[in-house]
Amino acid sequence: MTHFRIVLAAVACVLAFNTHAGLFEDDEARKAILEMRQRLDVSQQRMNEDLRKANEDNAQLRRSLLELSGQIDALRSEMAQMRGQGEQVTRQLSEVQRIQKDLSQGLDARLSKFEPSKVTVDGREFVAEPAEKQEFEAALAVMRKGEFAPAQVAFTNFLKRYPQSGYKAPALFWLGNAQYALRNYRDAITNFRTLVATDTEHVRAPEAVLAVANCQVELKDINGARKTLQDLLKAYPQSEAAAVAKDRLSKLK
């Protein structure tokens, strides 16, 4: 608009000057003014059209920017939701892994109850079934409580059920001791001698031989006890049982 006014003012000045100078006739001046106005109108229309288009373009740009901003916000929200879902999935995965680990450990623990395992008794290491180990320990617990009759039954049943067990020698030893406490000396002698015969190098063997001599003394078999003690000194001269045997021999008459 400012440009249009400047142009119009310039035209008026030119026409006034020309009229004043007498260069144009009145008709020619009016004609020139009309042509100039038409040109100015066309220029004004073009400017208005350009302005309208510019406004429309600006409005369209603002709408596009708003739409883009909305899309960006929606994308941010979606990404935040995806991060939340990812964190949730991670937590769920960790929980599943923990449960799997617990189940695996629980399964291993349950399976271990049925699988053979290594045990060490009287310095000997061997493999035993879970039930076998449990029964021996139960019988030994009864023996340690001084319940000799139930202990005799428990060890007898154990040896029948597991005749080739790695617990055989200690089971015979404690069975003989239970029978000695019950004054069942002859059966005690049998079990002590079986221990020595089947496992001469067992750590309980010297004690078993000494226990046989003790049973013979209780049965008034002094000659037999003396011979057993002498055999003990020959077979196991460095054992603690041999030192006891020497003392017993000096007192036997």
Image (tube, helix red, strand yellow):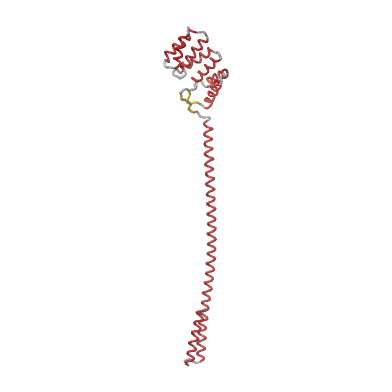
Number of marks present in the image shown:
0
> Quadrant of the rendered structure where residue 67 is?
bottom right
Q: Position of residue 246 (x, y in %)?
A: 44, 12
Query: What residue sits 52% from the left and 69% below the top?
Result: 58
Q: Position of residue 177 (x, y in %)?
A: 52, 17
Q: Where is residue 176 in the image (x, y as percent from the top left)?
A: 52, 16
Between 41 and 95, the one nearer to me in the picture: 95
Q: In this view, does 96 lie above or below 244?
A: below
Q: In this view, does 105 lie above or below 212?
A: below
Q: Where is residue 97 in the image (x, y as percent from the top left)?
A: 52, 42
